[in-house]
Image (cartoon, grey):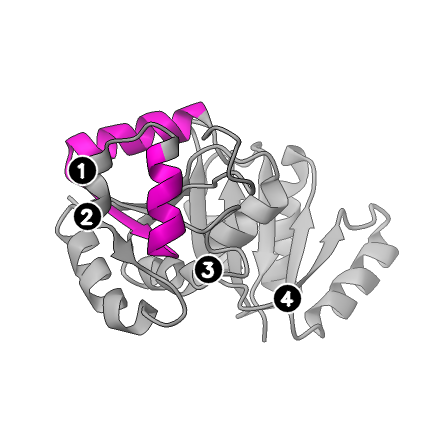
């Protein structure tokens, strides 16, 4: 059974406590001898200890940033394939959001490895991080118009955009949106984040037509991201 890559959002400042689910998950990770990858060793170790997490774990941290990712990617994916979980932390904030962790997330999807995260309060940012599709910038287009002609016009415009595009809508329009993308923007890779941070969370990446055929329950909260061209 393969392991999971778990993104762990952390406070931006040095004084705030770690979110409770993240704390419990990291404490259990220590007991299970899972891998902790962090962006910068010195501040990462200092914050880890200040949160009250096991001090002895800091000696085994994996340094993962823009300078070291190429050296660690193969090894980390191999560990995930062998069943090890990996917890990824940035210096502060959400890992893999405009961050070197994006490359590891992308490799996980290509290796059919599950990517998830401990609780984070912004679904759009979380979806971008979990997608592994957004290398630098994205456009938030939100809800498409309901009127058919206006909606088709917007989809046609979005299809020409070269950067990643984030879309959202009510659960009962998920199937319609996937059908429209499948028809109007065929072949464009899509990330679909369903019920993010819920027990029923599911993250899918691939062709909209394939996702459409694989899904059974369409009435779920979602964020959809079109990959950049």
| Separation of residues labelled 2 and 4 (CA atoms) | 35 Å
Element on which disc 2 rests: helix
Q: Residue at x 54, y 64 (%)?
A: 134
Q: Is residue 40 above or below residue 162?
A: above
**Marked residue nearer the N-terminal end (3 or 4):** 3
| Alpha carbons under labels 3 and 2: distance apart | 28 Å
Which residue is denoted by mark 2 in the rendering? Answer: 59
Q: Secondary structure at mark 4?
A: loop
Dot 2 alpha-carbon crowd within 10 angstroms: few under 14, some 14 to 19, many 20 or more: few
- Where residue 221 appears, x then y in whole percent? 59, 34
Residue labelled with disc 1: 56
The reply to whether callout 1 and callout 2 are in contact (CB within 8 Å) is yes
Tell me the residue that label 4 is attached to: 137
* Residue 17: image location, x then y, percent: 48, 28
Picture coordinates of residue 84, whole percent (x, y): 17, 46
Secondary structure at numbered mark 3:
loop
Residues at discs 3 and 2 in contact (Cβ within 8 Å): no
| CB contact under 8 Å: marks 3 and 4 | no
How many C-alpha atoms fall within 10 Å of the one at disc 3: few (<14), some, or many (≥20)?
Answer: many
Distance Cα–Cα, label 4 vs label 1: 38 Å
The residue to which callout 3 is attached is: 132
Magenta span main SS: helix
- Residue at screen point 44% across, 61% down: 102
């Amino acid at each position: 059974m393969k392991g999971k890559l778990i993104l762990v959002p952390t406070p931006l400042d040095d004084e705030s406590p770690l979110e409770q689910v993240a704390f419990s998950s990291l404490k259990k990770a220590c007991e299970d001898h899972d891998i902790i990858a962090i962006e910068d060793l010195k501040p990462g170790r200092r914050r880890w200890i200040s949160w009250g997490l096991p001090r002895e774990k800091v000696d085994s941290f994996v340094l993962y940033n823009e300078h070291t990712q190429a050296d660690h990617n193969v090894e980390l994916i191999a560990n995930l394939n062998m069943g090890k979980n990996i917890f990824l932390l940035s210096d502060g904030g959400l890992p893999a959001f405009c961050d070197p962790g994006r490359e590891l997330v992308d490799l996980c999807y290509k290796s059919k490895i599950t990517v998830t995260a401990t609780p984070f309060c912004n679904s759009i940012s979380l979806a971008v991080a979990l997608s592994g599709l957004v290398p630098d910038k994205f456009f938030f287009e939100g809800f498409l118009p309901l009127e058919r002609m206006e909606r088709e016009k917007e989809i046609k415009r979005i299809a020409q955009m070269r950067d990643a595009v984030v879309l959202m809508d009510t659960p009962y329009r998920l199937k319609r949106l996937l059908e429209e993308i499948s028809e109007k923007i065929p072949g464009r890779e899509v990330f679909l984040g369903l019920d993010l941070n819920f027990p029923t969370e599911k993250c899918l990446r691939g062709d909209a037509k394939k996702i459409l055929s694989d899904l059974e329950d369409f009435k779920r909260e979602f964020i959809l991201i079109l990959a950049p061209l």
